[in-house]
Image: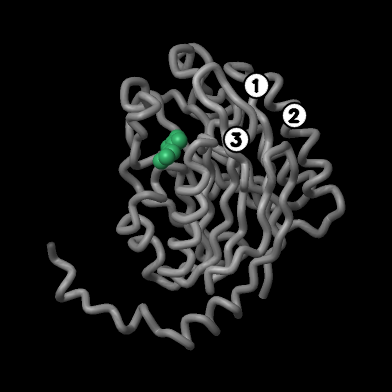
Amino acid sequence: MKLNVALIQMDIAFGDPKTNYSNVERFFREAAGQGETDVVVLPELWTTGYDLTSLDQIADVEASESIAFISKLAMKYKVNVVAGSVAKKSEAGLTNTMLVINRQGQLVKEYSKAHLFRLMNEEKYLVEGNGDGLFQLDNHLCAGVICYDIRFPEWIRTHMLNDTKVLFVVAEWPKPRVDHWRALLISRAIENQCYVVACNRIGSDPNNEFGGHSIIVGPWGEVISEGKDKEMILFGEVDFDEVDRVRDTIPIFSDRRTELYKL
Ligand SMILES: O=C(O)CCC(=O)C(=O)O
């Protein structure tokens, strides 16, 4: 069983959801218009970018506009969408929330970023999430996390323990640390023997330049496809049988010594 994925590595208009909606609509035609794509992936905070000081005014209340917008595209193109994350405003406060919508246009998951990134002042404006990032797509158990979350291998491992075979990552990862981005994602793939499908933005905002290099890594740690330093759609394939082959070759999940991991 395979899944074809398309990662939209886009620039994001700062604090301008209207422009970003229209750009995403244009990218969708290219990413899913041929009818071969199973999952479209968007980057982190794709409606607003990191316009933190305006978030209270421009965040999406209950994420309802973004959900309606992506649901329509999902149904039109009959694709699943790991719809990056959006700034969501709710009773809980402002959260950086991933939306996952299936081919029928139904919201199957909301995951709010668990680890807020102090270097970019997230904790001053956002509330951290407390739930997991697990969801089903076409009957496959998948996980999704947001940017800085990938620096916490124990958080990722928690998601991969129940035969989860794909980890989706959505990000606004700055250019100066793209070497960390690649090394961390390849490591998460090797240590969890899973596919890592990671979509980063490109371009810049008043405070940061972002690194692109969206990437699809296989369960043996091989880079299957990698983006460059420009707007583009990255296509690739996830093969669930390959995950089983790697896990049978080196059975790390059954070799774990959890009684030692108490520190
Ligand atoms: O961990 C990093 O270096 C980047 C993280 C980040 O940019 C984010 O979480 O938004």
Q: Is residue 153 visible?
A: yes
Q: Nearer the viewer, residue 250 or 22?
A: 250
Residue drawn 45% across and 48% down? 180
Give the residue pinned by disc 2: 23
- Where is residue 88 shown, x and y percent of the image? 47, 27
Q: Disc 2 residue type?
A: Asn
Number of numbered discs present?
3
- Is the residue marked 1 within 8 Å of ligand 1, measured from its CB? no
Foreground of the two, 9 or 203: 203
The residue carrying pointer 3 sits among few (fewer than 14), some (14 to 19) or many (20 or more) residues within 10 Å by Cα, namely some
Question: What is the residue that sits farthest to the right in this orientation?
Answer: 34
60 displayed left or right of 31: left
Q: Residue at x 70, y 27 (%)?
A: 21
The percent coordinates of residue 122 (x first, y second) are 37, 27
Rendered image: mark on residue 67: 3
Give the image location of residue 162, x and y in percent: 40, 70
Q: How far is the residue under mark 3 from the one under mark 2?
A: 16 Å
In the displayed structure image, the side of residue 103 where residue 194 appears, left or right: left
Q: Gap between marks 2 and 1, in whole Å?
A: 9 Å
Badge 2 vs badge 1, beta-carbon distance below 8 Å: yes
Tell me: residue 60, above or below residue 141: above
Residue 13 is marked as 1
